[in-house]
Every structure is written in structure tokens, then in C-alpha cells.
Image (spheres, rainbow, N blue to C red):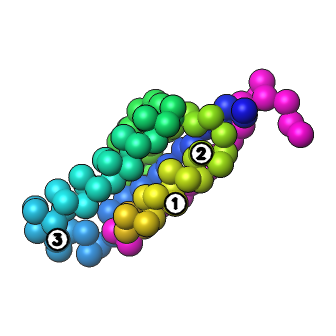
């Protein structure tokens, strides 16, 4: 198993702001369920941070997964829940430097 870090940058797309409170809450709840399922499978959210200064995104979220495949599964479930339709994003996945490469 290769310890992996997933770095997720995001910002709301303009049409996110046109949703009413109830619609935003429903979508946020769906995405929280994805996060909870990943945690139940052994992932750890290391934190979510607001980005200040010159950057294309508003937040950065950092997760530790057991493998790159587990990080990809997390992202696939978020996109299945329409996250990518409402948020612009950039993702990076990296292996621990202590993990031997194949």
C-alpha cells in the first residue's frame, strides 16, 4: 500500500451563487457523505484552508489516502455527485517519499 496525499484546490463556479440556500445545503450534504465514506474506508482529511494572496482558487483541502487509487475513487464519487459542475478545481496526488516506487 502506498501512502498518498491528495491536494484539492477549488473555487465556486459563478452559477453556484445563483442557487438558493436549500439547494446549496443539499449538494453540500451529498459531498459530505462522500467525505464520510472515504473516512470510513481509512482516508484522513488533514485540513481545509482558505487561500490568501495571488491564487486561482479559494480553498485547498488536503487528504491522506492509502493509495492513489483510493484518492481517485474519492474524486470519482465526488464527480458522480456533481461536485465538478459547481466548483472549478485542480487536483494533485503524490506518493510519500518513503514509499518505494515499483
Residue 49 x/y as whole percent:
38, 38
42 sits left or right of 40 in the view: right
Q: Nearer the viewer, mark 3 or mark 1?
A: 1
Between tags 3 and 2, which lies in front? Answer: 2
Q: Is residue 94 or residue 26 the one in the foreground?
A: 26
Q: Quadrant of the C terminus?
A: top right
Secondary structure under the numbered disc 3 in the rendered image: loop
What residue did someone put label 2 on? 70
- Left or right: 58 in relation to 102: left
**Which residue in the rendered view is the most extreme toward the right?**
102
Residue 49, numbered label: none
Does residue 88 appear in the picture of this structure?
no
Instruction: Specify the quadrant of the image occupied by residue 98.
Output: top right
Is 96 magenta? The answer is yes
30 left or right of 20 in image: right
Q: Quadrant of the N terminus?
A: top right
The tag earlier along the polypeptide, 3 or 1, is 3
- Residue 83 to residue 53: above or below: below
Q: CA distance from mark 2 to mark 1?
A: 10 Å
Give how far across and how far down residue 96 sits, in percent.
Answer: 71, 30
Residue depicted at 37% across the width and 64% down the height: 81
Q: Which residues are magenta?
A: 85-102
Q: Position of residue 89 (x, y in %)?
A: 47, 61
Kindly identify the residue that appears in the image at 46 percent across and 58 percent down: 77
Is residue 63 found inside the magenta-colored segment of the image?
no
Q: Secondary structure at mark 1?
A: helix
- According to the image, label 1 marks what residue? 76
The quadrant holding residue 83 is bottom left
Mark earlier in primary sequence (3, 2): 3
Up/down of 69 relative to 88, above or below: above
Q: Identify residue for label 3.
A: 19
Amino acid at each position: 500500500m502506498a501512502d498518498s496525499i491528495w491536494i484539492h484546490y477549488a473555487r465556486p463556479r459563478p452559477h453556484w451563487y445563483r442557487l438558493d440556500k436549500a439547494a446549496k445545503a443539499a449538494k453540500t450534504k451529498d459531498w459530505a457523505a462522500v467525505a464520510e465514506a472515504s473516512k470510513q474506508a481509512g482516508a484522513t482529511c488533514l485540513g481545509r484552508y482558505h487561500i490568501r494572496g495571488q491564487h486561482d482558487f479559494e480553498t485547498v483541502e488536503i487528504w491522506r489516502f492509502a493509495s492513489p487509487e483510493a484518492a481517485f475513487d474519492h474524486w470519482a464519487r465526488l464527480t458522480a455527485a456533481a461536485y465538478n459542475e459547481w466548483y472549478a478545481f485542480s487536483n494533485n496526488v503524490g506518493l510519500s517519499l518513503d514509499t518505494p516506487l515499483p
